[in-house]
Image (spheres, helix red, strand yellow):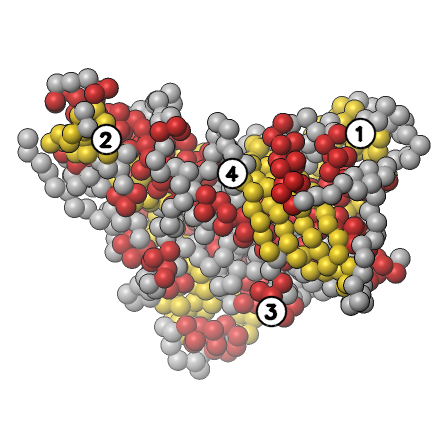
């Protein structure tokens, strides 16, 4: 049998992409022996909404690759090397490694023989954005099926050639075995002429987990060697021949992206003010978009600072120091999520109802490296390199921004420095695209630190209002509402140039985990959807972390009110067997001692009191009723210095049930990262504003947790018990704020209902 050796560059490493790797459709044609260049008529264009049945206009992406065929997800070359494709991206969570394990497992090849291509719009289907830790739970499903189907096709082909039954054959490391002995056939031999342009079988038989050899085993991160060796990985490090550098001159109303003046606030640009600087290529003005493009980066920075630009004045912000009042006054529309029984007519026991409110602040992603993007417009095609988490949506945005046909735009996803959701990565990429299209040379845009702090879409503030208690039969009554102001932060270039209307849609992301997971005799849950106040979008845990802060603080307050142990009180109202098992397991692991009330702990001579808190919840994302991800429970110990008000989280026991674990090391790393970041958010992080906009535009104005304050972390992962994998990322942060608040209450007997728990808030609570 003749063999065709195909040696096309399928490496999706950034440098390979930069070297103009052929489009994915081209590779497939070559694999199938048809060496034709792709044309517009060959391109499938479709817009897929992100998962979730929400009513607001969904984010949409452009899909140039069909998502219903095997070859959309798996290809094998004549050397037996596997290239697998997924529309999601690795945001530093180890997704690339886990997907490699899944593909290698189903195909029975070595992980080293699998190359993952992630988030390249010419090569991967649109599977929605990489959000909500849903990649393994949802986006990996078609990939796994495609790998299993490919294995079945190739084994059937081998059986036909050998003249035996498929059940007589096995595969080890891509080699076909018959009765334990190697045959002449490998995947590389078998792939020739094999048709993978076949429909993806939704019912294909995948491997029995009992036969897993790779999934469930710790595997080193496949992305680390390139990073450790300093090879090109990050978009910040990329350079293109003839590349220019640009800096954007932004309006003075820092971090505000809606309002009647959006796109109409620019009065004048004095280009003569920078004409004396050498190396300036062009000052580009489109509506309110102003940028300086220069041959060298330092010149672009200097010119952007020197350029004289005048703007119309903007109305002042409302009082952002009084977040509860500002959110309450912001016009809203209530959207009921759940309404069972007549809550207003509830009769309570002799303890009466408890009425509380909890406040969550605006918080930053605080990416260590400011966002960066590159673009090249050559031969009427635009290529953009970006750290985006939504490459296919960015594709659609740039098509709108530049009015270009979608098949003439390619987004190549590269790693970026820090991403916890919608930061400025897409803004930098779109601005680079606009400038490259305008000038006709490759352009690199990197934000400055003050720009990143001011303009990154913040994790939004929230007001959580709760009334509830126990009725005379001892059943829970719960009335909960959340105020959530966000517009999902359209990219700035669209707003600046007037390509999108100044009043963007109200976002419905306040749903996440808004419904508590306790049995309630009467319950009412609603979301106050409202226009954004400052630029805001999704950030790790999105609304689930604030919502659970309220749920789990409130039930702790009820337990204290009824003189009950907090863990036993929760168990009394739980129905979910997985939540019950997890709660008991982590309490036992931490050596939880039942207590009937929250006594003040014994103070040490230093004035430091020690307390212990508990909180738990399953993370539910997407519009209600949403998609359930992992269950997580925290027990944490804190020290509270009653003289200074400083709180330190000493130790956290984290119980986790995410079903089947693909890479135990990866899950453990995710949990550690979530614990550390959420402790920082709970104890320190909140954005400061003045009348104009964001006032904290440097690190000194936005402190984060230091290494000395990182807690000891003990992770307990529950056995899979036959359950499929669930999202294992953000869930780790969801119970954090309530667990810490409950521990502080245990330590000093005061209840903190406003995050972060800064020393001044602790001291104020003690005084009150």
> Which residue is more in the foreground, 765 or 467?
765
Q: Residue furthest bottom?
A: 276
**Which label belongs to residue 171?**
2
Q: Position of residue 196 (x, y in %)?
A: 24, 29
Give the mark nearest the N terminus, 2 or 4.
2
Cα distance in 3D space between marks 4 and 3: 33 Å
Q: Which residue is mark 1?
A: 476
Q: Nearer the viewer, mark 2 or mark 4?
A: 2
The residue under the point 76% across, 27% down is 520
User: Marks 3 and 2: in contact by CB < 8 Å?
Assistant: no
Q: Which residue is mark 3?
A: 698
Looking at the rendered structure, the secondary structure element under dot 2 is: strand
Q: Which residue is mark 4?
A: 727
Where is the N terminus found, in terms of image quarters? top left
> Which residue is more in the foreground, 546 or 617?
617
Looking at the rendered structure, the secondary structure element under dot 3 is: loop
């Amino acid at each position: 049998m003749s063999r065709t050796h195909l040696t096309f560059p399928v490496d999706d490493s950034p440098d390979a992409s930069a070297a103009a790797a052929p489009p994915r459709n081209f590779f497939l044609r070559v694999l199938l022996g048809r060496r034709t260049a792709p044309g517009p008529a060959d391109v499938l264009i479709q817009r897929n909404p992100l998962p979730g049945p929400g009513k607001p206009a969904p984010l949409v992406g452009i899909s140039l690759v069909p998502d219903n065929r095997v070859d959309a997800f798996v290809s094998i070359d004549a050397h037996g090397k596997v290239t697998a494709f997924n529309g999601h991206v690795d945001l530093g969570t180890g997704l690339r490694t886990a997907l490699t394990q899944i593909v290698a497992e189903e195909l029975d090849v070595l992980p080293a023989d699998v190359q993952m291509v992630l988030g390249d719009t010419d090569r991967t289907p649109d599977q929605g954005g990489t959000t909500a830790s849903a990649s393994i739970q949802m986006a990996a499903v078609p990939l796994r099926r495609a790998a299993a189907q490919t294995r079945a096709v190739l084994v059937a082909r081998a059986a036909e050639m050998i003249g035996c039954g498929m059940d007589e054959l096995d595969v080890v490391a891509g080699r076909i075995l018959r009765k334990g002995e190697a045959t002449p056939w490998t995947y590389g031999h078998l792939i020739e002429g094999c048709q993978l342009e076949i429909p993806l079988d939704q019912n294909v038989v995948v491997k029995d987990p009992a036969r897993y050899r790779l999934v469930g085993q710790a595997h080193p991160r496949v992305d680390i060697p390139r990073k450790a060796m300093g090879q090109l990985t990050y978009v910040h490090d990329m350079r293109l021949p003839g590349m220019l550098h640009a800096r954007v001159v932004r309006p003075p109303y820092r971090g505000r992206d809606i309002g009647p003046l959006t796109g109409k606030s620019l009065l004048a640009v004095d280009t003569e003010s920078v004409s004396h600087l050498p190396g300036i290529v062009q000052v580009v003005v489109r509506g309110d978009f102003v940028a300086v493009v220069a041959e060298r980066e330092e010149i672009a920075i200097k010119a952007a600072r020197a350029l004289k630009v005048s703007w119309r004045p903007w109305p002042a912000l409302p009082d952002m120091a009084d977040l509860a009042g500002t959110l309450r006054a912001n016009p809203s529309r209530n959207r009921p999520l759940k309404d069972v029984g007549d809550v207003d007519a509830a009769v309570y026991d002799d303890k009466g109802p408890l009425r509380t409110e909890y406040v969550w602040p605006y918080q930053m992603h605080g990416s260590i490296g400011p966002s960066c993007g590159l673009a090249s417009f050559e031969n009427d095609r635009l290529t953009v390199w970006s750290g985006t988490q939504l490459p296919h949506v960015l594709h659609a945005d740039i098509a709108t921004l530049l009015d270009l046909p979608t098949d003439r735009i390619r987004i190549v996803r590269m790693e970026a420095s820090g991403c916890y959701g919608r930061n400025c990565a897409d803004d930098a990429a779109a601005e680079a695209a606009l400038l490259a299209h305008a000038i006709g040379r490759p352009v690199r845009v990197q934000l400055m630190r003050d720009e990143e702090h001011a303009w990154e879409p913040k994790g939004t503030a929230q007001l959580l209002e709760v009334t509830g208690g126990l009725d005379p039969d001892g059943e829970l009554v719960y009335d909960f509402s959340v105020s959530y102001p966000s517009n999902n932060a359209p990219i700035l270039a669209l707003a600046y140039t007037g390509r999108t209307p100044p009043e963007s849609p109200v976002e419905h992301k306040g749903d996440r985990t808004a419904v508590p997971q306790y049995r309630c005799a009467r319950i009412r849950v609603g979301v106050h959807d409202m226009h954004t106040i400052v630029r805001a979008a999704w950030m790790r845990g999105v609304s689930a972390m604030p919502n659970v802060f309220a749920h789990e603080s409130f039930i702790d307050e009820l337990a204290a009110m009824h003189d009950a142990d907090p863990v036993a009180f929760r168990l009394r109202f739980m129905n979910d067997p997985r939540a019950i098992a997890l709660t008991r397991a982590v309490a036992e692991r931490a050596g939880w001692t039942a207590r009937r009330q929250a006594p003040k702990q014994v103070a040490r001579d230093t004035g430091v009191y020690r307390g212990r808190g508990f909180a738990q919840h399953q993370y539910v994302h997407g519009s209600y009723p949403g998609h359930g991800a992992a269950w997580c429970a925290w027990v944490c110990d804190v020290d509270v210095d009653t003289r200074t008000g400083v709180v330190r989280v000493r130790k956290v026991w984290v119980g986790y049930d995410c079903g089947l674990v693909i890479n135990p090391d990866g899950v453990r790393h995710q949990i550690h990262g979530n614990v550390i970041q959420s402790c920082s958010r709970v104890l320190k992080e909140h954005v400061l504003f003045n009348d104009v906009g964001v006032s904290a535009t440097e690190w000194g104005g936005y402190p984060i947790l230091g290494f000395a304050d990182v807690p000891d972390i003990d992770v307990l992962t529950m056995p899979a018990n036959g359950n499929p994998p669930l999202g294992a990322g953000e869930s780790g942060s969801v119970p954090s704020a309530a667990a810490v608040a409950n521990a502080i209450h245990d330590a000093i007997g005061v209840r903190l209902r406003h995050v972060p728990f800064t020393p001044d808030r602790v001291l104020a609570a003690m005084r009150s």
